[in-house]
Image (tube, grey):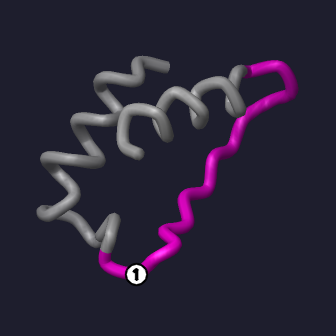
Amino acid sequence: MCIGYVLDILTTKAAKTELKLGFRKPAVIVIVGVNGGGKTTSLGKLNWLIG
């Protein structure tokens, strides 16, 4: 998963979709994947970039 690509979608294209980060807090994002797929690591990195 490319963090830069996901961050780009969430920051620049979010206004064009129904995804409204910051509209209501806390924002809920569902991440789905297999065991050992790096979900926690990716979310930690994404949180550090956004947060």
Q: Image point 46% across, 33% down: which residue? A: 48
Residue at label 1? 24
Q: Is residue 28 one of those drawn in magenta?
A: yes
When the figure is inspected, residue 44 is found, relative to residue 18, above or below; the finding is: above
Residue 19: tell me if it is visible.
Answer: no
Q: Image point 25% across, 42% down: which residue? A: 9
Which residues lie in the magenta part?
Answer: 23-37
Whether residue 34 sits left or right of residue 29 in the image: it is right
Q: Position of residue 46 (x, y in %)?
A: 47, 34
Whether residue 36 sits left or right of residue 25 in the image: it is right
51, 3: nearer the viewer: 51
Magenta segment main secondary structure:
loop
Q: Give the residue furthest to the bottom.
A: 24
Q: Position of residue 17 (x, y in %)?
A: 22, 65
When the figure is inspected, residue 41 is found, relative to residue 43, above or below; the finding is: above
Q: Is residue 8 one of those drawn in magenta?
A: no
Residue 34: tell me if it is visible.
Answer: yes
Whether residue 1 sits left or right of residue 35 in the image: it is left
Q: Give the residue furthest to the right.
A: 35
Q: Image point 71% across, 32% down: which residue? A: 40
**Amino acid type at mark 1:** Arg
Q: Answer few, some or many: residues within 10 Å of disc 1's Cα (few below 14, many 20 plus, some between 14 and 19).
A: few
Q: Image point 38% across, 33% down: which residue? A: 49
Q: Position of residue 10 (x, y in %)?
A: 29, 48
Callout 1: SS: loop
Identify the image quadrant of residue 50. Answer: top left
Whether residue 31 sits left or right of residue 1 in the image: it is right
Total number of numbered discs in the rendering: 1
